[in-house]
Amino acid sequence: MYKIMTPGPTQVLENVRRARSLACTNPDLDESFYDFYKETCTLISRLLKTGNETLILGGEGILGLEAACASLTEPGDKVLVLDNGIYGRGFADFVTMYGGVPELYHADCRNTLDVAALSDYLKEHHDYAYATVVHCDTPSGVLNDIGSICPLLKQYGILTVVDSVSGMFGEEVRVDDFKIDLLCGGSQKAVSAPPGLTFVVVSDDAKEKIKTRKTPIASFYANLAVFEGYYEKKWFPYTMPISDIYGLRAAFDNIAADKDLYARHKRIGTATRAALGEAGLRLHLDSGFSDTVTVFDVPRGATADAILKRMKDRHGILLAGSFDELAGKVIRIGHMGTNASFENMLATMEALSETLTHFGVPLEGNLADLFLKHYRPTVSE
Ligand SMILES: *Cc1c(COP(=O)(O)O)cnc(C)c1O
């Protein structure tokens, strides 16, 4: 068994695994399952600080993104796609697929999106049906300030679709304060349940736009409107993956009970970045560091594949490389959800120090020592 330290999927606690093995009922016919589903959705909404409705969909994180675009996009709609990362620009594909016209707003991929520059741009260009933005663009780890970006877009009446699959529950998301219309999450990142589920939090404005469409939604599985009235009608559009949802609920109960959630991610993220930096490694980003993932450039003398292989084979720890234009160029340490513990990070730093030293990468000190030096424990630790 490897210690999973990737930016998703993440480590799954035993109580979540056990919840997935509970006895199954027929989720279409047993009315108590409708209550369980709805209570779980309400819990997710509460944890995301909103009264907006959450819908859990049976499919991976990608389904949530596609469902948001499929449900909102009408043929010919102009959509602003904020792009400072691989997932950011990826939204353009979903927009196009459902007949929309994406307009990409390119920004520097090594920095958090410049909100002032976007504000200037919007003064001249604001004729959009909606906009898409990624909270934490996981391949580079860049974190965008959705708390400023979404209210700014909303001033122009532009609805927002936010992908916070790898941000939420490691970085705080307050849906109402941030004025987010469609927020997409997934089970396998900071939530720390196994892959397989996505959830979408839907505002009244988004519901209104969906309801007043002139054209039908060109999908069934990615159609958020098919959930309309499911609870009253006791009818799901398709059979819900009951065991996955039992596990998801246990994972959210863990999150609800964790008073230290955001502070813990902050402590781990801060100490990890400080340790790598002081050791002389190059953090991939100049700004916009997420407390869910740390990304560093592959140092001279080593290759991403060799580092990942030694971490896995010698130390039993899974780190991640990246993809597209970042393939082979960076290493990613996922410290989100259950991964984000002092013990996990200390072991990872110790192993990474050995691995890099093995490949002749000069380090200004042992990474685990540097991590300890920069780690600010709370009183209870
Ligand atoms: C993981 C992730 C997703 C979902 O991707 P899957 O392939 O379904 O896991 C979506 N957006 C971001 C930013 C992610 O990190």
Image (tube, grey):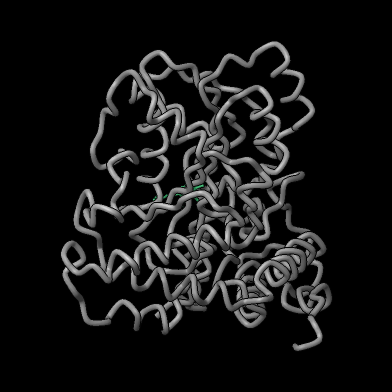
Residue, far front: 232
Out of 133 and 1, give the one closest to the viewer: 133
Left or right side of 190 for 238: left
Quadrant (top left, top right, bottom left, bottom right) of the N terminus: bottom left
Depth check, front residue: 302 or 346: 346
Q: Residue at x 42, y 69 (%)?
A: 193
Horizontal side of 4 relative to 351 (left or right) equals left
* Residue at the spot 60% in from the left edge and 45% down from the top edge: 135
Query: How far from the left and from the top, in percent, is residue 238?
Result: 20, 52
Towards the viewer: 144 or 26: 26
Image spot of residue 364 (x, y percent): 81, 67
Q: Residue at x 40, y 68 (%)?
A: 248
Which is nearer the eye, 338 or 276?
Answer: 338
Residue at 61 percent across and 48 percent down: it is 175
- Residue 121 shows in the view: yes
Place of residue 360 in the rendered image (x, y in percent of width and height, measured from the top left)? 66, 65
The total of numbered circles placed on residues is 0
Specify the quadrant that holds the C terminus: bottom right
Q: Tell me residue 324's x, y (percent).
A: 47, 39
* Residue 356 figure quarter: bottom right
Specify the farthest residue to the bottom: 380
**Please, is residue 56 above or below residue 120 in the view?**
below
Image quadrant where residue 211 sits: top left
Vertical side of 124 occupied by 63: above or below: below
- Horizontal side of residue 32 vs 320, given as left or right: left
Q: Can I make out residue 306 in this image?
A: no
